[in-house]
Every structure is written in structure tokens, then in C-alpha cells.
Image (spheres, rainbow, N blue to C red):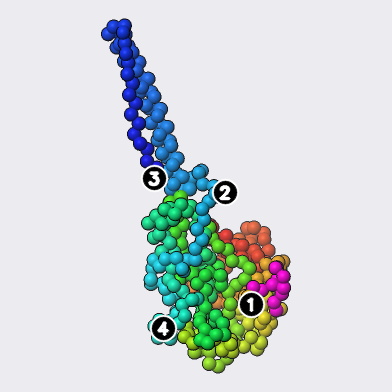
Amino acid sequence: MVKQNERKIAMYVKASCGKRLLAVLLVLTLVLGSVFCTAMSAQAYAQEEEAASAQNNGGATFSWDNATVYFLLTDRFYNGNEANDHSYGRGLDQNGNVVSGVDPSATFHGGDFAGITQKIEEGYFTDLGVNAIWLSAPYEQIHGYVVGGDSNPSFPHYAYHGYYAMDYTQTDANFGTAEEFQTLVDTAHAHGIRIIMDIVLNHSGYNTIQDMAEYNFGTLKNGWESYYYSHQNVNNTTYHSYIDYDSDAQAWGRWWGDDWVRAGLAGYGGSGSGEVQGSLSGLPDFKTESAKSVSVPMFLQEKWREEGRYNTEMQKLVDYFSSTGKSRTVTNYLAFWLSEWVR
């Protein structure tokens, strides 16, 4: 808060024309002094209000031209709520215990919305001169893990970074709740800090053994259960040997489906090339250039039913597409889901 120093105005009157003239001058001095002080007080008040507005609400003084932006991965910043550290069973064995001896390079570390909010309130960002925070993607990520490579032993690789989206319609539980996200944004605004959201719309996350089993898509081979949970000694070749990528187009169609993504799966058209149709590191590539009207992927419909959100989420889509007249393309679905975060 900008503090205003007191201003004292001392006025001296010298009169050589007798007491009566002195009295008149004193009265004029008091009147003019009163008007001057009132004007100064109003100006000081207005300046203080403007400063407070700029500090608390990111008022007119904010400009993106010279914003100081702090980029952070929510998971790697600060752990404000340890209760959500192992959401969806991440990092746990079949008995609910933390798996020991796992290389932590690509696991979740516990950072969350609550931790960021705490640091805003403590003045961490203000002390750095930061007035905009760029957050990693907050929406729900793939639940399971993929594998870091073929080194022996390798390590489980989770979506701690926010770039393996699974469901754009709600927060990832490891990062926190929707209410905690709202509190983070409100707290930032109260401290004159803007929030920038990372947007991921080129690709979805990988398929994982855990998600395949949980949402009934794709084909798993005998023995997959041993790799469902976080694993100490896992390697890429062994992990994928329990997934049959060629067997059943109908089963793989229950995931995103060929209308939504390019991928090397049974029933899918395969990966493309170039900036528009190429797949990044084998990630399922959204067909953002497609003009075809598509349905909500089957696994998402099943997920929403299990969570009791099916009717709500489907009605939102009906309202959006009917009110805007837009076609149900992949791009328009993604644009709607992502813009909902701003609303």
C-alpha cells in the first residue's frame, strides 16, 4: 500500500497597517487556507484510492507491455495441501502405500493451488516485482503413468507438468479443487497480479494401463495388473508389451476415437506429418484442422457418468452449440472447454 506522508502548510502574515487590517488578512488566510487544504486532501485521497486500486485490482497502471511474468509448474512450486499428493492412487502400491525406491524425476511432488495461494498471500511474488503468474495447465491429467525410457531400471513418468490432458472440464485433483483454483485467482487479483493459463490443445495425454483399465478402452494383455501401480523397476518395452495396440478397433474406439485424434492404434488413421498433422513425441494429435462434426469421446461420457456429471456436461455443450450456431468440430469443443476456465 502506498503511504501518504502528512503535509503541513505554514502560512505567515505580516501586517503593518494596524490590527484591523491584520484581522482581515488573518480571516482571508484562514478561508483560503481551508479551501487549499480541502483541495489538497481531496487530491491526496484520490491519489491514494488510485494507488490502492492499482495495487489491489491491477488497475490502470498495469500494462502487458512491461509485465513481469513468473512461469511455474504448479506441482513443482509449493505444497500447500499434502492431502492431495497421491490423488487417483499416483505413486502408491496396491495397498495404498507410497512406493519406495522410485526415481522421483517425473513423479508428482505435491505442489498445488493452495501452495501458490499461500505464497501470494505471503508476498513472495510482490517482493520479486511479479505482476503476472503463468500457471501450468490446471485441468485433469491422465491418471496413470507412462515410462521414461528403456534404461534398466527406468522410472514411472506422470503428468505432473500438466501437458497430458484427459478431461478439460475439471481440475486435476493433485493440483486441487475448482474452489481452490478460484481462491488462487481471486487472491492474485487482490494483490494486483494477473493469472495466465497455459493452454494445451495440440494433443491429449498418452494412454496408460491405469486409465485403460479404469475407463474400459483399448486392449490389455495378461499380466498387466503388475504395472497398474507405480513401479520401481519398469522399462518402456516391458510396460508396452502388456498393451495390444493392434487387436481391436472397437475397443480402441472407446478412447478418443479416430474422429478426434491421429494415433498409431487399431481403427485410427495413423500419425501425420508437418506442423499441423504431425504427432509430438507420439502423443495423440488432435484433429484441430478437421471440419467434421464429432461426438463426445466414449471414454469421457463413461467418466462423466461414473462421476455423476454426465447430464450437466452434456447440457453445457448443447447450450453452447445451439446458442452460437457453431458446428461440433474438435477445435470448437476444445475452445469451449478451455474458455470455460475464464468464465
**Residue 266 visible somewhere in the drawing:** yes
* Residue visible at 48% across and 48% down in the picture: 58
The residue to which callout 2 is attached is: 65
Say which mark, if any, is on residue 76. Answer: none
Q: Earlier in the sequence, mark 2 or mark 1?
A: 2
The residue to which callout 4 is attached is: 100
* Amino acid at pointer 2: Asp
Left or right of residue 247: residue 198: left
Say which mark, if any, is on residue 282. Answer: 1
**Vertical order, 206 against 95 (above or below):** above
Q: Earlier in the sequence, mark 1 or mark 3?
A: 3
Which quadrant does the N terminus fall into?
A: top left
Frontmost of labels 2 and 1 is 2
Residue 272 spot, x, y in % from top left: 71, 74
Residue 272 falls inside the magenta stretch = yes
User: Quick check: marks 1 and 3 in contact, CB under 8 Å?
Assistant: no
* Amino acid at pointer 3: Met
User: Quick check: marks 4 and 2 in contact, CB under 8 Å?
Assistant: no
Q: Nearer the viewer, residue 18 or 239?
A: 18
**Vertical order, 46 against 25 (above or below):** below
Frontmost of labels 4 and 1 is 4
Cα distance between the residues tagged 2 and 3: 23 Å
Q: Secondary structure at mark 4?
A: loop
